[in-house]
Amino acid sequence: MNANLYALFEAHFPVGGEQPFLLLPGGPVVHYDELAAASARIAHALVAAGCRPGDRVAVQTDKHWEALALYLAALRAGLVYLPLNTGYQRTELAYFFGDAEPRVIVCRPGAETAIAALAPAATVLTSSASGGSLLDAASGQSASFGTVLRAPDDLAAILYTSGTTGRSKGAMLTHRNLASNALTLVEEWGFTRGDVLLHALPIYHVHGLFVASTACCCPDRGCCGCRSSTPPKSRRSCRTRRR
């Protein structure tokens, strides 16, 4: 049995994939099948960039829906996803890159030269809401990708702590950790088909990515929109029920 977190998400996607996954204010509606296809293309692009299962992919980009597809792509390819706060500066980034040794770094367009100087052994790609070299590389790839087999205790992500009491520590999260969290969230929130989660957090944030977004990847089955800062305990009262 494949313990890859993406396999769990995929098992909860609606049959046919036509249901909306993301509702973007002033933008498109992204359906589950479109998300799956985008993540497959990006997974192929990451492999083409030299990534192999277990390699780290560091990401410092602004919030846009393809960044979520990038996270799913990293899972599908058996990679370890490392989200980084967009406010981190050169000294902080140099430490993270030196410690995690990412194979690929995805950053905002215009930052690639500075990022490459900090991590000369990594392949640096760019991504933003208007495009970038990662999406260019993904555009011609197949919309299908065989999800890499992962064991429950294989790493899925690394999150660095704030460093309040010293150097930031890399917290290692396994596929089992994140799958358990996803299933518990869906059960506790009662998140079901037709529910809408209002998402206003950055997706480098532990809650924004591994809590709020996860609930939309593994419900039975809902979708994600913008925006709310309501605490999780009272989130249920602000959901919009869709017919």
Image (spheres, helix red, strand yellow):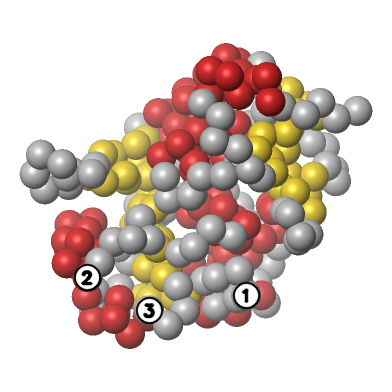
Q: Quadrant of the N terminus?
A: top right
Left or right of 88, for residue 209 = right
What distance separates the C-alpha of mark 3 from that of mark 1? 15 Å
Answer with mark 2 or mark 3, whichever residue precedes in sequence.
2
Q: Amino acid at mark 2?
A: Arg
Task: Calculate the distance from the C-alpha at mark 2 to the C-alpha at mark 3.
Answer: 11 Å
**Three-letter code, disc 1:** Ser
Element under label 2?
helix
**Residue occupied by mark 1:** 130
Between 133 and 194, the residue placed more toward the observer is 194
**Horizontal and vertical percent position of residue 153:** 35, 32
Residue position marked by numbered label 2 in the rendering: 90
Q: What amino acid does circle 3 point to?
A: Ala
Image coordinates of residue 89 in percent, x first then y, are 25, 66
Q: Nearer the viewer, residue 231 or 102?
A: 231
- At a point 65% along the width and 20% down the height, the residue shown is 236
Q: Residue at x 42, y 68 (%)?
A: 106
Percent position (x, y) of residue 218?
Answer: 63, 31
Q: Which residue is mark 3?
A: 111
Question: Relative to the observer, which residue lies in front, 145 or 136?
Answer: 136
Name of the residue lying farthest toward the right: 243
